[in-house]
Image: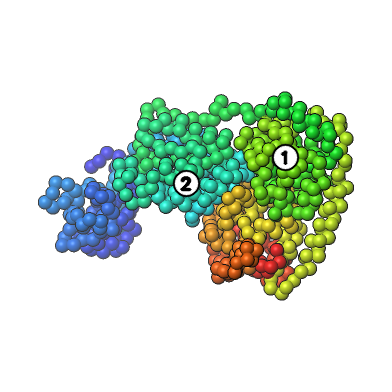
Amino acid sequence: MAKNLKWHKVLDNTEELPEGRVMSVTAEHQGICLTHFEGKFSALDNKCPHQGGPLGEGSIENGLLRCPWHGWDYHPCTGKAPGFDDGVDTFLTKVEDGAVYVGIEEEAPHETTISDVMVETMVNWGVNKVFGMVGHSNLGFADAMRRQEEKGNLNFYGIRHEGAASFAASAYGKLTGKPAACFSIAGPGATNLFTGLWDAKVDRAPILALTGQVATQVVGTGNFQEVDLVKAFSTVAEFNHRVQNNSKHSELMSLAVKHAILRRDVSHLTFPDEVQELPAPENAEAQTSENRMPDLRISPSQESIDKALDMFRSAKRPVIIVGHGARFHMDAIIAFAESINAPVMTTFKAKGLISDNHPLGCGVLGRSGTPIASWFMNEADLLFVLGASFSNHTGITDHKPTIQIDFDPLAVAKFHKIDAPVLGEISTTVEIFHNELSGKIETVDQRPDVAKRWAIWKSEKAKRLLDDHGKGISSIAVFDAMNELAPDNAVMCVDVGNNAYSFGRYFESKNQDFLMSGYLGSIGFAFPAAMGAWAAVGNSRPVIAVAGDGGFCQYLAELTTAVKYNMPIKLILLNNSELGKISKEQRAGEFDVWATDLHNPDFSEYANSCGALGIRVENKEDLKAHMEKVFAHNGPALLEVMADVSLI
């Protein structure tokens, strides 16, 4: 008898396995083919030695156990292959009190693997949120993550589609400035990550992609689910490597995370199947970020500062424009704005970086913006632009004297000449301007103008709130209710389409954070992004998603993910049974409206069937009461608003 033999109950009742049948069971981590043949219960290794076929899924024919994959025969009790010198291992069995037990040797302690070293390094660098799907080509790496999760060092969220995983990780990076990871198998799982990775890349959010890969020996042979992932990811990933058995594993993971953080870009590592479970090299240790990161508080050149200061000294009505790149620097920016009486407006991606209730807050510029911001743009004699890229959606004119501050040299004067380009870390640079200009320049106090323009806009919104075509609830009514009921400190994730434009125009920000698919403009972003936001803030802040019916249907099944992990995300869903923005663009382009109508389920009933709260509202009079119920619900909830596609 083997030393340290341990008995495991694998069958509660012998009657569960009739004579002449086989089944797969597990004892600790050992897969076993349990057989019942000639009145005897026997236990064989479940893995056929030829192709790894599960013998417990086979059948006994003519007194022999046949492998279900390629038909090799074994004796059901001895494991021998008649006529050949191979076979499978067997284990001791016994029957006690009608139950079947299998005896196996006690498992040896776990030996540290390459995956263990790399996952621990990843966690040490602060990447402790992973969204993904476990599958056959990433099992070794997944097992290493499981060990870290059991230690309380990592949270893994099993999603229903890998695209949702990368969107969630992208949103996490946008909100925190730190990377989360998305995780997939080889082939289709990896390619499903692409949309969310491109979203992160073009919006400059750090993200780490981890993909399984088929065994190295079959790469290039057209093997099942084989895709050259290094080549495939070469366009989206700034850092892109295949892990090999002789790689410097902890260093490779350290560089992947470091590139993601400093370049605000995509890092990708792919793990061939055979590498994941290899024992770690002797003396291999996980790395940390200690003394591996530079101080990024870089001051601009004195020459660029002097030129910009001269422009300020001659300005009377300067305005400040902030983009998403300024999101971690708003305390310094608002203090400077208050010292020189300068109104502050934002790009759409930067919505909410200053409260619309602030005396100098002017809301959003551009296509999703308000007349307030555009009015101040026209009246300004100097634009002070921070962390914005001047894309054609922002509405930042190139005809006004402009100072641009950014910490990315490629973002400075990206699309056209800038009168005073200033390269430097934003907070550090703004403090220089504050010290040099506060109390030393004479500018017009524009606070009364801000208040006046807000009054005009609110009067206009009140008129639009009365519009009713009898075909559903207007978007302005939805966001008017949200202005009253949405928690002041919520993280709000918005999709693309008419719902996004209406959100930007009508929702008045307080202390909320806002996340969107900016430059990629990908439909389907909102709900997966809300999962990423919740992973970042937990239950310390409410998380709200705003989407149209077209966008939510892209990742409809992720509502079950929110229920599984008890993510108390609140979804405000505008259902107008149409891709309304596309219909609008077809009309504007003088095309026929075609293929934009949608056939939808009852989303509220779907939410209830998933275990969330679902409420449908069809009358404007019921909107606030139902929204209040959704926001108060302790768990995931969906408010389906039957909306009028024409009232946006």
Q: Which mark is residue 385?
A: 1
128 left or right, relative to 32 = right
Q: In this orientation, which residue lies closer to the viewer: 378 or 328?
A: 378
**What residue type is disc 2 on?**
Phe
Residue that appears at 82% across and 46% down: 379
Q: Amino acid at mark 1?
A: Val
Q: Can you give x and y, in whole percent of width and height, for residue 351 in the image?
A: 70, 49
Residue holding disc 2: 183
The answer to whether residue 598 is left or right of residue 76 is right
Tell me what residue is drawn at x 60 percent, y 45 percent. Answer: 203
**Mark 1 residue crowding within 10 angstroms, few (<14) / some (14–19) / many (20+):** many
Q: Is residue 579 above or below residue 196?
A: below
How many numbered discs sit on the rendered protein? 2
Q: Is residue 290 visible?
A: no
Percent across and percent down for residue 72 are 19, 54
Q: Position of residue 643 (x, y in %)?
A: 67, 68
- Helix, strand or loop status at disc 2: strand
Left or right: 185 in relation to 123: left
Question: Quick one: quadrant of the C terminus?
Answer: bottom right
User: Which residue is nearer to you in this view: 602 or 198?
Assistant: 198
| Residue displayed at 23% across by 63% down | 19
Residue, far bottom: 470
Residue count near mark 2 (Cα–Cα under 10 Å), binned few <14, some 14–19, many ≥20: many
